[in-house]
């Protein structure tokens, strides 16, 4: 029998049992693709990560990310959390890590407290912002279980966006609609069938203004995530998209997510214009929860 060590932690929070849960296998050599997928399904979290030696020795590690049903090219809270785990083992002594992922290289800046302990990390999305088409309000509202007039279109229609291979539909909504939203699985399936621009995938990132910050919720029931308490790979394209809509060269924005689930999460984003396009970052704190081993 073979055993593989794992740890779990809560990401984008400084309070245990808040934020988004993550399982990390820090030494995954010897696991097959099928075993990684089976373990991710067994943990039944939004994502589980598996750490392997880097293809390029100049980088810190190769990280594979699986949700309940498929491998992901990039994801935010798994990148932040995996970086935190690797830092506990001594990697990143210079304050940075470089993680190889399917979508590209994810650069990490570690956060430390006054005593030098690593408390969290900020990651850079591996690709510039890429915008897809606007999507019909009625279909997106049906997916979110809200009336069409709950979607705010003064600045933009529901818009497909990504910066690491995970397209998200960014949707500005009213305060009442954000509170009332409930994903409708049938509507998600109908939308995927009717809207070829979605490429067979659909995740909704609903947001509204809340003073100087944003409040957000994310629904991706087609991958088994009915609601996600913190979604870094949606926060970064949202930060980039909002910069795109305005005239500034750079911006920073805090996003509060997961409140309705009882797992409040704080995602701290930045976005900036570069010669390659708009690039974004997201950062947050991490808290350890469990450790153990999987025996296969």
Image (tube, helix red, strand yellow):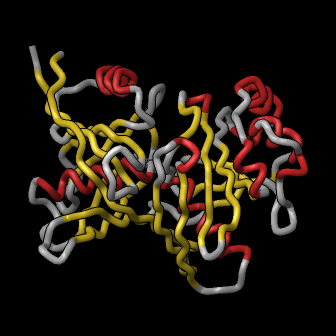
Quadrant of the image occupied by residue 290: top left
> Looking at the image, which residue is at 89% across and 42% down?
138
> Looking at the image, which residue is at 64% across and 41% down?
203
Please say if 114 is above or below 294.
Answer: below
> Looking at the image, which residue is at 47% across and 29% down?
70
Quadrant of the image occupied by residue 38: top left
Is 23 left or right of 7, judged from the image as shown? right
Please say if 259 is above or below 186.
Answer: below
Is 284 left or right of 111, judged from the image as shown? right
Relative image position of residue 201 (x, y in whole percent): 64, 35
182 or 131: nearer the viewer: 182
Residue ranking furthest to the top: 1
Relative image position of residue 23 (x, y in whole percent): 30, 37
Relative image position of residue 263 (x, y in whole percent): 46, 46
Is 130 left or right of 40, judged from the image as shown? right
The quarter of the picture where the N terminus appears is top left
Please say if 254 is above or below 88.
Answer: below
Please say if 41 is above or below 103.
Answer: above
Quadrant of the image occupied by residue 234: bottom right
Relative image position of residue 32 (x, y in whole percent): 26, 24
> Looking at the image, which residue is at 35% across and 44% down?
17
230 or 75: nearer the viewer: 230
212 or 123: nearer the viewer: 212
How many numbered dots are placed on residues in this image? 0
The quarter of the picture where the C terminus appears is top left
Is 243 left or right of 100, judged from the image as shown? right
């Amino acid at each position: 029998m073979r055993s593989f060590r794992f740890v779990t932690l809560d990401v984008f929070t400084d309070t245990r049992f808040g934020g988004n849960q993550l399982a990390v296998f820090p030494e995954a050599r010897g696991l097959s693709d099928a075993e990684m997928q089976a373990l991710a399904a067994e943990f039944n979290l939004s994502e589980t990560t598996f750490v392997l030696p880097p293809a390029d020795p100049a980088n810190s590690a190769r990280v594979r990310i699986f949700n309940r049903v498929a491998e992901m090219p990039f994801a935010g809270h798994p990148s932040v959390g995996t970086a935190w785990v690797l830092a506990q083992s001594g990697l990143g002594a210079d304050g940075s890590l470089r993680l190889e992922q399917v979508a590209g290289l994810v650069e990490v800046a570690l956060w430390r407290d006054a005593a030098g302990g690593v408390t969290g990390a900020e990651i850079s999305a591996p690709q510039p912002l890429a915008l897809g088409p606007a999507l019909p309000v009625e279909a997106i509202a049906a997916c979110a279980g809200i009336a069409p007039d709950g979607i705010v279109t003064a600045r933009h229609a529901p818009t497909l966006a990504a910066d690491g291979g995970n397209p998200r539909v960014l949707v500005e909504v009213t305060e009442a609609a954000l509170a009332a939203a409930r994903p409708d699985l049938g509507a998600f399936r109908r939308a995927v069938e009717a809207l070829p621009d979605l490429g067979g995938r659909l995740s909704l990132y609903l947001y509204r203004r809340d003073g100087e910050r944003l409040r957000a919720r994310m629904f991706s029931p087609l991958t088994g995530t009915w609601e996600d308490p913190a979604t870094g790979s949606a926060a970064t394209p949202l930060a980039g998209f909002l910069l795109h809509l305005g005239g500034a060269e750079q911006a920073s924005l805090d996003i509060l997510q997961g409140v309705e689930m009882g797992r409040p999460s704080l995602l701290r984003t930045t976005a900036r214009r570069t010669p390659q396009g708009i690039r974004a970052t997201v950062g947050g704190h991490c808290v350890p929860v469990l450790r153990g081993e999987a025996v296969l």
